Image (spheres, grey):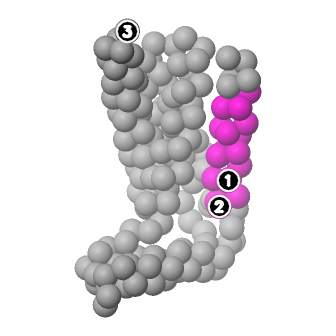
Amino acid sequence: MTKYRILLWILIVVMLSVIFAFSSQSGEDSVALSTAVAEEQQHITSQLAEGGITEIDDFIYAHIRSMAHCILYFLLSVFIFIQCRLYGIKPLYTFVLAVFCCFLYGLSDEFHQKFAEGRTSCMEDVLADTLGACVSGVLSLIFEKLFILFKGVRK
């Protein structure tokens, strides 16, 4: 059990570091990365659909940054949720704690981002962070209940 706790602490620190690194990018670097990701996504969907699905492409391109926030904080919340459960914290408290920690880190991340060249802070990003954490928490609760249910059925 101890090795899982250590591994999860490492994963949590890595996620915090990745988020911090993205926030430290200059505005120019951040836009370049978002554009590169969106262009690669468009290339993949056009190959899959022979001619592309332009409505989906346009939607994804317009929301690529919000989706990145959601995904990063989704993963961070999963790691926090599992770690809390390994320490024996009740599921509902774990959900609240994971979402609250992600919300606070999202706020501090936006504050930090204000000081990066060409960047601003935005409450919509904090909302995207919190949404990713909430979805993660709900899914974690559901998967835990299903795991317990199926574990009981197999006995």
Q: Is residue 132 above or below residue 60?
A: above
Nearest to viewer (mark 3 / mark 1): 3
User: As drawn, is 57 to the left or to the right of 5?
Assistant: left
Q: Quadrant of the C terminus?
A: top left
Report x, y in % for residue 81: 51, 28
- Residue assigned mark 2: 22
The disc, 2 or 3, on the residue closer to the chain's N-terminal end is 2
Image quadrant containing the N terminus: top right
Residue highlighted by disc 3: 155
- Distance from Cα at disc 2 to Cα at disc 3: 46 Å
Q: Quadrant of residue 43?
A: bottom left
Q: Pointers 3 and 1 in contact (CB under 8 A)?
A: no
Asked if residue 67 is positioned above or below residue 101 in the image, the reply reads below
Left or right of 110 on screen, residue 127: left
- Which region shows up in magenta? 6-23
Q: Residue at x 67, y 39 (%)?
A: 11
Query: How far separated are the C-alphas under marks 3 and 1?
Result: 41 Å
Please give the name of the residue rendered at 37% of the width and 41% of the height, measured from the top-left corner.
135
Q: Amino acid at mark 2?
A: Phe
Q: Earlier in the sequence, mark 3 or mark 1?
A: 1
For the residues bearing labels 2 and 1, Cβ distance under 8 angstroms: yes
**Residue under the image location 70 percent in, 45 percent down:** 14
Q: Residue furthest bottom?
A: 51
Asked whether, in this view, residue 148 is left or right of residue 27, the answer is left
Q: Secondary structure at mark 1?
A: helix
Counting from the top left corner in percent of width and height, residue 42 is at 42, 81
Label 2 SS:
helix
Q: Residue at x 38, y 29 (%)?
A: 143
Is label 3 in a helix, a strand or a loop? loop
- The residue to which callout 1 is attached is 18
Q: Residue furthest left?
A: 55
Q: Looking at the picture, how far across and down is residue 54, in whole percent?
A: 29, 84
